[in-house]
Amino acid sequence: MARHHIIISGTGRAGTTFLVQLLTALGLETGFTDPTAALYENCNAGMEWDIRDPDAPYIIKNPLLCDYLDEVLANGQFIIDHAIIPVRDLYSAAESRRSVDKHTDRFLFPDVVPGGLWHTDIPEQQEPVLANQLYRLIYTIGKRDIPLTLLHFPKFLENPDYLYRKIGFLLGKTQYEQFQKAFRQVARPELVHDFYREGERKPPLEGLPNVPENGALTRDLYLDLLINTLANTIYQDRSIDPSNAGSFQPGLRAEGRDWPAVAHTMIGVQRLKNVQELAQRVINEGVPGDFVEAGVWRGGCCILMRGILEAYGIADRKVYAIDSFAGLPPPNPQSFPQDSGFELHLHSELAVPIEKVKANFARYGLLDDQVMFVKGLFQDTLPSLKAGPFALLRLDADTYEATHIALRELYPRLSPGGFVIVDDYGAYEPCRMAVSDYRSLMDIDAPIHEIDWTGVWWQK
């Protein structure tokens, strides 16, 4: 009886080991139980099987399949259900092999260097060798009519949603939340190196001198520091929230359950990280449009949005900061009875003048013409706002009225594939009702994902 397999192969140095680690963490049949097992320390790769091994698992990863796949399939003993090939810029794949070969101790690997030069001893010949190997593999796949999935590297290592969609055929009933948890467990994008030919080196990010070749790591470190600075988990200011006023409490700040005396946002670390994750997905997936927040308080979330654009060197998107900059208006129970008894307008600490918000942007070096301020009540400003499309829409509007108006005026301008975030969905019943009513009215059935105790998001 013929044996069935799924194969993972290609040029190597393109994330194939990460795929095996992820599938192992998800409990699929890879022949491994530990996602960190069978790795060569010199190249942080391995976890390979020979398909001809009688004990070989269903899912097999091996670049050597480029050499012998056609021969193995000729005898009819094996059936390949699907082939997965990660593809990387050819120069980067070759340069990665050259780098591993150069920096590996030959005393430990006197014959063949794992992850090093392949089928050549001449470093300059690695590109044509890899191109030939990849062609042989794809030719065999086409000849044998094997279903094929190509994955872009490093995109699939940085974007769990992209990878989840691409390999969904393999995941069965695995839910996205389970997949994302396993992804975060094994993904190490900081190990990905950026390789550039002579004269092609990218310039450093403005304000971040001496950026190393690993630009992804530097970008992540910058954004992580920006998030912790915006939430002020570093100097740990007290809470002025009437319900928990007093000294700094890490748990409350992480979940955005206090009103900070000094920090530039009150949404907490978890919801800030959600903004980062969804903004990065917008960038990676090429969703067109600007970023917008309706209800900005001291501006912290919008500052993060602008910081993300800066970190990625993006100059053709804007950030819209929309607010009254005078606090919340009194409820209008005649038109919106859902807001009856809602008294957030009485809290003067929620009113932050636009001049103060702009000054906060300037403190981070992020106040420029990519930030657009829209001042006034939503019902006065949004209907006539000449802006859009949007790729990321964040609502921090609190009331039924404000949430309803923001959705009515801004959601139609959200690009397909864009994201909407609602900050107060779990905290305030009027906000939740406004979201539910609008989704029902517009027949929106996209699943709602929880961020923490109050924030949610969905994808259009």
Image: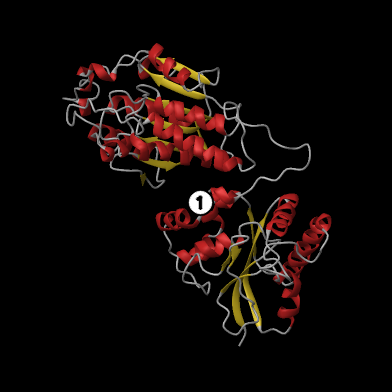
Write down the quadrant of residue 117 in the picture. Answer: bottom right
Camera-nearest residue between 372 and 22:
22
Residue 289 makes an appearance in the image = no
Q: Is residue 245 above or below residue 421?
A: above
Residue 456, percent from left and from top: 35, 41
Label 1 secondary element: helix
Q: Residue at x 65, y 41 (%)?
A: 213
Q: Residue at x 43, y 64 (%)?
A: 173
Q: Amino acid at mark 1?
A: Pro
Q: Is residue 260 above or below residue 441?
A: above
Q: Which residue is mark 1?
A: 160
Residue 418, percent from left and from top: 50, 38
Position of 289 with respect to 90 (left or right) is: left
Q: Within 10 Å of the Cα at label 1, are there few (<14), some (14-19), or many (20+) other Cα atoms?
A: many
Camera-nearest residue between 149 and 129:
129
Residue 366 makes an appearance in the image = yes
Q: Residue at x 57, y 26 (%)?
A: 207
Q: Quadrant of the N terminus?
A: bottom right
Camera-nearest residue between 149 and 383:
149
Residue 371, percent from left and from top: 51, 20
- View extreme (bottom): residue: 1
Q: Is residue 30 above or below residue 310?
A: below
Q: Is residue 35 above or below residue 74?
A: above
Position of 176 with respect to 350 (left or right) is: right
Position of 60 with respect to 448 (left or right) is: right
Residue 342, percent from left and from top: 19, 25
